[in-house]
Image (spheres, coloured by chain):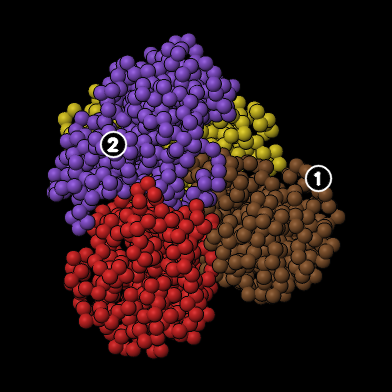
Chain colours: A red, B purple, C yellow, D brown
Amino acid sequence: MTSIAIYGAAGYTGRELLRILSGHPEVEVVHATSGTHAGQWLGVVFPELLRAYPMLRFAERDAQPPEGVEVAFLCLPHGESMAAVPPLLEAGVRVIDLSADYRLKEAALYPEWYGRDHAHPELLAEAVYGLPEWNGDEIGTEVRLLANPGCYPTATLLALLPAIEAGLIQPATVVVNACSGVSGAGVRPSETTHFVHANESLKAYKVGRHQHTPEIEQLCAEIAGSQVVLSFTPHLAPMNRGIAVTASAALAKRIDPEAAWELYLNRYLDAPFVHLLPAGQTPDTGRVRGSNQVHLQVVVDPRTNRLVMLSAIDNLVKGAAGQAVQNLNLMVGWEETTGLLAPPLVP
Amino acid sequence: MTSIAIYGAAGYTGRELLRILSGHPEVEVVHATSGTHAGQWLGVVFPELLRAYPMLRFAERDAQPPEGVEVAFLCLPHGESMAAVPPLLEAGVRVIDLSADYRLKEAALYPEWYGRDHAHPELLAEAVYGLPEWNGDEIGTEVRLLANPGCYPTATLLALLPAIEAGLIQPATVVVNACSGVSGAGVRPSETTHFVHANESLKAYKVGRHQHTPEIEQLCAEIAGSQVVLSFTPHLAPMNRGIAVTASAALAKRIDPEAAWELYLNRYLDAPFVHLLPAGQTPDTGRVRGSNQVHLQVVVDPRTNRLVMLSAIDNLVKGAAGQAVQNLNLMVGWEETTGLLAPPLVP
Amino acid sequence: MTSIAIYGAAGYTGRELLRILSGHPEVEVVHATSGTHAGQWLGVVFPELLRAYPMLRFAERDAQPPEGVEVAFLCLPHGESMAAVPPLLEAGVRVIDLSADYRLKEAALYPEWYGRDHAHPELLAEAVYGLPEWNGDEIGTEVRLLANPGCYPTATLLALLPAIEAGLIQPATVVVNACSGVSGAGVRPSETTHFVHANESLKAYKVGRHQHTPEIEQLCAEIAGSQVVLSFTPHLAPMNRGIAVTASAALAKRIDPEAAWELYLNRYLDAPFVHLLPAGQTPDTGRVRGSNQVHLQVVVDPRTNRLVMLSAIDNLVKGAAGQAVQNLNLMVGWEETTGLLAPPLVP
Amino acid sequence: MTSIAIYGAAGYTGRELLRILSGHPEVEVVHATSGTHAGQWLGVVFPELLRAYPMLRFAERDAQPPEGVEVAFLCLPHGESMAAVPPLLEAGVRVIDLSADYRLKEAALYPEWYGRDHAHPELLAEAVYGLPEWNGDEIGTEVRLLANPGCYPTATLLALLPAIEAGLIQPATVVVNACSGVSGAGVRPSETTHFVHANESLKAYKVGRHQHTPEIEQLCAEIAGSQVVLSFTPHLAPMNRGIAVTASAALAKRIDPEAAWELYLNRYLDAPFVHLLPAGQTPDTGRVRGSNQVHLQVVVDPRTNRLVMLSAIDNLVKGAAGQAVQNLNLMVGWEETTGLLAPPLVP
């Protein structure tokens, strides 16, 4: 058994890691920290996890991991992870960071999009961005620091990249609209997350300035081989989980609908979590809930000469904790799907 | 008091007309038809309307209006209205048609988008498209047949048209994403509208082929003075009411964010139901529920050189029954806002 | 026009008063206070109310009412109203208190149920409990201080009292279960009201110790003519508005189902907001939303020899702001239904 | 591997069995029938299950099970199971029936509560009612026909029985209120299950006459040793899954709150799925979603001298498919928790 630590284990992402890892046959969570619940029994704070973790108590937010911990998941707020990573690496602990702190290669983007300078820019080059369907080759046993992608980037990139890679679309015309469930706004109560405010409400926010934008553009540019600037508008939708992405771009060349569909089919033939839906079906957040699955569809619109690329994921699983475990599997050398095959909870 | 008939009064749109007209000081609903509930007391089928209509019974779906009816609202399925209009006009009854049957000027579009030929193409030229904020001048006491706009077109056009009119955007680059509440799918039970299916679910549908598309393009073209072909993707969101539109287009010229905002402010200064939000706020379906209000916002994105235009309406009110009453007011010569000033139900 | 002040106008109850009073033909709201929003324009904080109150700014929470105010509504937290009432009365302003601070006649109940002594017990005898269907005779032009009932008590008492009055049930066997929408938990964000926590969640809370219990028992005892102690369990349900009450008690005598139904029908024949549903239908929170209506049903269960009494109201309307306006109408001498006849928003 | 058949596999219960059994290490589902989807690939109808069942096609509703099937789950509508059971038993297939058709011991109760005579009353005595926490001893390798409890009975009985067994409450005073998610109403679209109707709606239904009542009373009577007649009122709540039960009864003797809590604790000490919450917490449907867990609480109300017993389950798991698998485990002799330990999906 591999010993695991989770920092920030009481937020939605950390809690989801606890849920998923409870069914992973190769790991044992031995350390879970929480600023709010330090000292309390995990099974009292989260009764649904009592049977899975009967003997675990929350440690202080920044408590050193016990001897023997091999991998630490960081579910800390953006900014806090920056400082937490170096001491862990020095102690010989490998890190999977679920924050945005090591996702961008260019240090200058941090003050621009996150409002603060990066404290450890020297580590940015080493950090591997962990989207296994696109750079699984880089995610191996030698990786010390893995930057786990954001929820919007995961759903958007999986929809966009096959078309970009194939030169099918004009990158300068990409428009991305995404709708997220409220868990994406985090566990902290606020006016935005108040039930009465969020229920029966759908609205755009951070129009043109969401901090996940450069992360999306970075990998698009890498695949396209040239800079990509895209229009990204996130929305908050009245549901607990799920992200649905609708991306659209002008076609760069003529293509039959069937050929576009087959292009996507072939690109993801070996991706165990990606499921291209039969033509005519559209991805639905309600069909991926609680699982690491990605549902995709691609539609050629001959009237506008555009390609419409659709995806749905569970923001807390493939958009966060599930993908982190997928990366863990690859980093340790286990089967990529270990502990991640439970089907979605439908309905 | 003006005597009113409602055909198809038991669907969501007809029921909403009953609700709104119960507070209208100048009208009396004397005739309400329903195929399903013919012969039943309205107050037994809809207990919440018993006090408002204690003496009304549903008539047969195609029952002739009683003597004295001046205006008939048609809330019939697309296709049925076609046939119902001519006899009413011949009987001297003015018609407000909430179906799509008389919205498109070009008869050839009906088989293409609605799958059937138009039975009365000779009436298409006479029918006035009733979006008062844009063609209020045409909606007067001489109108016999008014085609009430669809829900998606209303929300989309109010967001797009000021920018198109001002030549601010390139019409060929317009991408529209819209999310609708489930009442937009109609009262008939189906797998799509099953609670367990729709709840916690967000998905695109009819990608590139929604029948409201030509209706949007028709008025855009009229204002632009040239053909407009746009990409429109509707989505179903887990809420009862509301449409949120996010439209985006490449800018045709440079403009400051403030100037774009002021352009919209000035365009709608005299529109009593349109409310441009303070900069920084975004339209929210939860803030217009049950009212005829339209909330708008416009954002310049300097990174992508695009304009993002946002709107929110209640699909059953400004997107259907409320706008129909607004048109009624203009057709009879009453104050445009009569019976329509109740604020939204928040929360 | 009668000049009105609202204290605590930015909470759900105060905001609902603003919404309802905007359609009341006899009043003008000239003073609205808010600790959080003092100094801000009402139409900026609540865009949906801009047209209704274009010139109103929030005053400080405890700002004195301007000259000429005749009635003040207090939507302050329990405890704060206690202190706010006496100065207003002294200034000649009549008070409708929507808090619990003047509902209980017995001062000793306050420390027991609300955890604090009453600061002005001398006013408890004067305060009139305002449930018009049961003590409308006491709510007249001479009332200075009206205690507006709680949401649970309103729904519960309207269901229970006809049976108690008629001696139909054994008071010692009454069991009340109630489900409330989340707006009942107030506007302040908390773990309980977080969307992700409240959505897809139904749970009991404050079992046997909800502070509305003595208020229910007080009026039951008055009508019964003897002490009533009942079991009350509230639940939180995933919806914005609405309370559904299911009360049950052992029958004190044999009665036919039809006779029980007629007893309720006759008792509320003159109550303009109470609607006894046809036999076989059950009250549904979704059918009273946004209105002052009360839906009732009564069922005789011959197997258990119990009577089941059911009610549904909108907790913010008949359970708070709407009933307060109903009481205002009676206190000033207007028609009881003035400004309150808008039908529910269905769906 | 044990070969399994599922009859009626496309309803909510059958689909949930497919989900749960996909993670069960000892079984293989080789036969899944559906009247609606016969002949279609399971992974096309339910894309989320494609990876789990890549080679399974729906068979005709009444298709004979293939050679080698050892156990059949029946997820057929009440009434259809009656006829399906005898031929399966004759073919040597053991049956777990998730319908109500073999739950009641007394044949005379079927026409009274289900509106039809029982077609095979001779099998009622043999059928074992499968609530493992209460009659696990009877659920062994010799059982041929197991009647899986209903969702309401499971939640209600687990809450009530410890108090009844201990003689703590007066059985004649039991009042049960229960709220169920909409999946309990089945997969068939109807007005009741329409999103727009069920959302924002809470209502009682079948007051005093729900068909699960005699099933609850039957086991209560067995444990009490005398007849029990109780008042049961179900409600429909706006959520996909979950049942919350609030049961209340007059105490038969004095007991401290702590002693009542310990009584429940001790009664379920060995029940791996039952979790008595710490005092002060109440069961919440949102904390058991997707799992076989049961959350319980028990409260002594000294004012009314009543005991309030609370439970929450997932109606599709512990209330149906999960409990069926728990029974399967016991019938074959595997560990009771095999395939059922995944924690709830929170949030």
Identify the residue at horizontal 71%, vertical 41% (top origin): C303
- The quadrant in which residue C293 appears is top left
Identify the residue at horizontal 71%, vertical 72% (top origin): D2
D139 versus D14 height, above or below: below
Q: Position of residue D267 (x, y in %)?
A: 63, 68
Q: Amino acid at mark 2?
A: Ala
Q: Position of residue A8 (x, y in %)?
A: 35, 72
Real-space Cα distance between discs 2 and 1?
Answer: 68 Å
- Residue B251 visible (yes or no): yes
Q: Secondary structure at mark 2?
A: helix
- The quadrant in which residue D226 appears is bottom right
* Residue under label 1: D117
Q: Secondary structure at mark 1?
A: loop
Q: Position of residue B310 (x, y in %)?
A: 28, 45
> Foreground mark, 2 or 1?
2
Q: Amino acid at mark 1?
A: Asp
